[in-house]
Image (cartoon, helix red, strand yellow):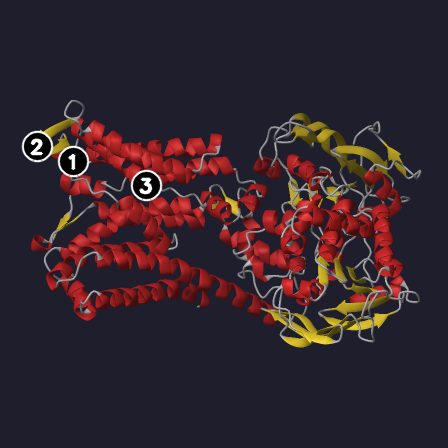
Amino acid sequence: MGHLRGKLLPPALAIVFSLLLCGVALVISGANPFSAFGAMVTQVGKGTTLVDIINSTGIYYIAALAVAIGFQMNLFNIGVEGQYRVAAVIAAVVGGSIALPTGIHTLVIIIVAAIAGAAWAAIPAILKVTRGVNEVISTIMMNGLAIGLSAYLIRRDVFGELRGNNIRTAEIPESGWMPGISFGGGGTMFGFIFVAVALGVGYWIMMNKTRFGFELRASGESSTAASAGGVNAKKMILVSMLLSGAIAGLISLPELLGRDHTFSLNFTAGIGFSGIAIALLGRNHPGGIAFGALLWAFLDKSGLALDNVGVPREIVTIMQGSIVLSVVVAYEVVRRFELASEQRRVGRELGTVGGAA
Amino acid sequence: MSSSTSVGTDEHPAVVLTGITKRFPGVVANSDVHLTVRRGEVHALCGENGAGKSTLMKILYGMQPPDEGTIEVNGEQVRFRTPSDAIKAGIGMVHQHFMLADNLTVQENVVLGAEALHGIGKKARARIIELSGRTGLNVDPGVLVEQLGVADRQRVEILKVLYRGAKVIILDEPTAVLVPQEVNELFDTVRGMQEQGYTFLFISHKLDEVRAIADSVTVIRRGTTVGSADPKTVSSRQLAEMMVGSELPSPETRESTVTDTVVLDVKGLKLMTPDGSRPILDDVDMVVRSGEVVGIAGVEGNGQTELVETIMGMRKAGSGTITLQDEDITKLGTLARREAGIGYVPEDRHRHGLLLTQPLWYNRILGYQTRKPTAKGIWLDTDGAKSDTERIVADFDVRTPGIDVPAAALSGGNQQKLVVGRELSGDPVLLIASHPTRGVDVGAQALIWDEIKRARAAGLAVLLISADLDELIGLSDTIKVMLRGRLVADADPNTVTPEDLGSAMTGAGSTSAAVQETAVVEEGEN
């Protein structure tokens, strides 16, 4: 019970705190916070907002899982952003240029995206393992390179084509699409959402039930104890980075397979960075990440309603930022409190005196 | 008590602690402690590891506030909020682990943080030279600390507190890092300074040393002072009984169980420093047989840690071979070596032995993530891990309310029992035990010794590294002395004394028939 309290209390505190903070910001800017928050909540029932939120949640969820795998062993894969961009353009190019039966075509695109993401992540992983290059620096640089690479690949003299005012890759034939669930006027839910759920289940099993998950967690908790326990640090860095990159490669697939069917200049950027925040918010736990992704998606999509009540949408960004900051602080406070109370409990049950220092 | 020459001598004792109580989560570290230190005396504070000595000294040095009780210095009640308050009141502390910057000179180390007193130039240098004489430090203040030996580093630490004006000097286990000869030199220094009016609070659990140096002794047990004694009349045995409240355990093993079966065979092992400039391990040859405990004696930092980590595969040997039961394991990784049957009790259980925030049963898996009963193929067997943890908790008397509490919630002794229990599971053929009873209470120490003895009788080969020479002599069948990365001498634990070992450890040459030099003694170094 104390366990659950330690897990649920911090995000709840953080959300309440950031609501207060945004309320203050709204009052200062001359708006009524209640009408603003009210508009956001009622927006959920309007038009396609609810389905948009679910779709967006799935995308954020995959991104945060990718980040969380690295976080588990204190590996900061800031490069999720670049990995999914490269994976998206390569998957779109491959998917648009091959002809395969329905289903298999989709599967090939998914595999290509995962491999492309992993390959892009392999570069910083190999640099770290062989040369000790800090992955934060190298993945940030790889993000910059990814933008350049994707821009080059969709040039008209490479794989791109001009369609209206937009440059894009060749459209993936219908055999490579992934059908969604239509709610008529309510929008269409991406079929890939189910893949996201499966990824979450797989992630939980991997972390809690497998040797690899154990070694990952042990490395994150104490790299020295892990190495004394026979965990090969270099192998773990390489494998977890590749896995993180492979999952990052799937981030754009809900949109690519379910709606856009092409990589164009309208590509949705920035999800990799949101993934970092959501993984922090969800404490790398598959359930926590799902909640964080949902919250993020809600703020994103229903924030659109703020314009209608004359409140700048950017208030949502303030809220997202303050949630992440306060959740990090809240977790640390609660963690220390829990550890101290656990020690007190052990001490009380054993009735020990002494054992200082 | 020798006469004090310092100004302002009066009736007031130097330090009086009254009714000090300090609680931490789960434990009362100090309860109702009373301590009176007269001016100009060497006052020893004795107690087992974990008895609360360190906490008490942290309170006196202003690092932690007491929950209850008062501190008086020179008859005036004081409240220390930080160590700098204590320093202002004339109290200085020499920590057990040196707090020196190796890449700075003696002068820079001394002046660091106290620049306001005499600047950082000539005045400071003159003051340091003046004070150096009192500590017996005969080196130029411009020498880098990394070039100094352990004993001189300790003098630099003392110099630091003198420079800040300390009159009462707390020495926290000052002899732990010294060999017997250096201990005598330290005691000469302390007596010399005592004559100049300095007061010492000497913290130790080594009773012979306490009786040799102290003018009075206060014993602390389970967080509270249990009495005072006159070191001139009390026997070590009486002191020990005051300290532990019962009889001391003995590490002594009775009969030899050594067999002819070679378990670990190390040949020509070499390891260089990362920059390749000098060897850390130099041509180490060693054999450990089934049923044998081979002890490695040596001053810390002479390659013992590296030897263990190289045998465990955590460091890659430059050359040489390591054979375990006729299998060459030189090229294998740590996990494969563990699977081949090596158990490993690391010297620092927090850094290398435990995942502190994880539950006990999760810690059971560490190092065994590929084997029964904690794993099946790529899958963890959490039920197996839990039930086997229950077994360890019962068999090794790990005091815990359950196996779901995080490892950090246990006391040091119980953590160590868990680690030893884990490393003795899965029928290892070789146990590498680095300082297996460091920082644990007497009860845990006795249990760990018993378990090592029992496993040895059952045919386990043990490589024991310890700074506790009594433990080493008591448990080992063979003792090897390590100096500057080499095994320089063999000693017979039946006849060798700690003093003999101490000589060999510092390279002073053999002074006893019990110590036989194995290698050509290196000369001309330094």
Which quadrant does the C terminus of chain B fall into? top right
Question: Disc 2 marks which residue?
Answer: A163
**Mark 3 vs mark 1, CA separation in Å:** 19 Å
Mark 1 Cα within 10 Å, few/some/many (few <14, many 20+)? Answer: many
Q: Are marks 3 and 1 in contact (CB under 8 Å)?
A: no
Q: Percent from the top left, x then y, of residue B44? A: 81, 64
Element assignment for label 1: loop
Q: Are marks 1 and 2 in contact (CB under 8 Å)?
A: yes
Tag 2 subunit: A
Q: Percent from the top left, x then y, of residue A61? A: 29, 49
Q: Which mark is residue B449?
A: none
Residue B162 seen anywhere in this rendered image of the structure: yes
Query: What amino acid type is highlighted by mark number 2?
Result: Arg
Q: Nearer the viewer, residue A200 or B269?
A: B269
Q: Nearer the viewer, residue A205 or B259?
A: A205
Q: Percent from the top left, x then y, of residue A185? A: 7, 54
**Mark 3 vs mark 2, CA separation in Å:** 29 Å
Disc nearer the start of the sequence (1/2): 2
Tag 1 subunit: A
Q: Is residue B18 left or right of residue A320?
A: right
Element assignment for label 2: strand
Q: Which mark is residue A80?
A: 3
Disc nearer the start of the sequence (3/2): 3
Question: Disc 1 marks which residue?
Answer: A264
**Mark 1 vs mark 2, CA separation in Å:** 10 Å
Q: Percent from the top left, x then y, of residue A37? A: 20, 66
Residue most extreme to the top: A157
Q: Residue at x 87, y 57 (%)?
A: B191
Element assignment for label 3: helix
Tell me if residue B397 comes above or below residue A73 in the rendering: below
Residue B435 seen anywhere in this rendered image of the structure: no
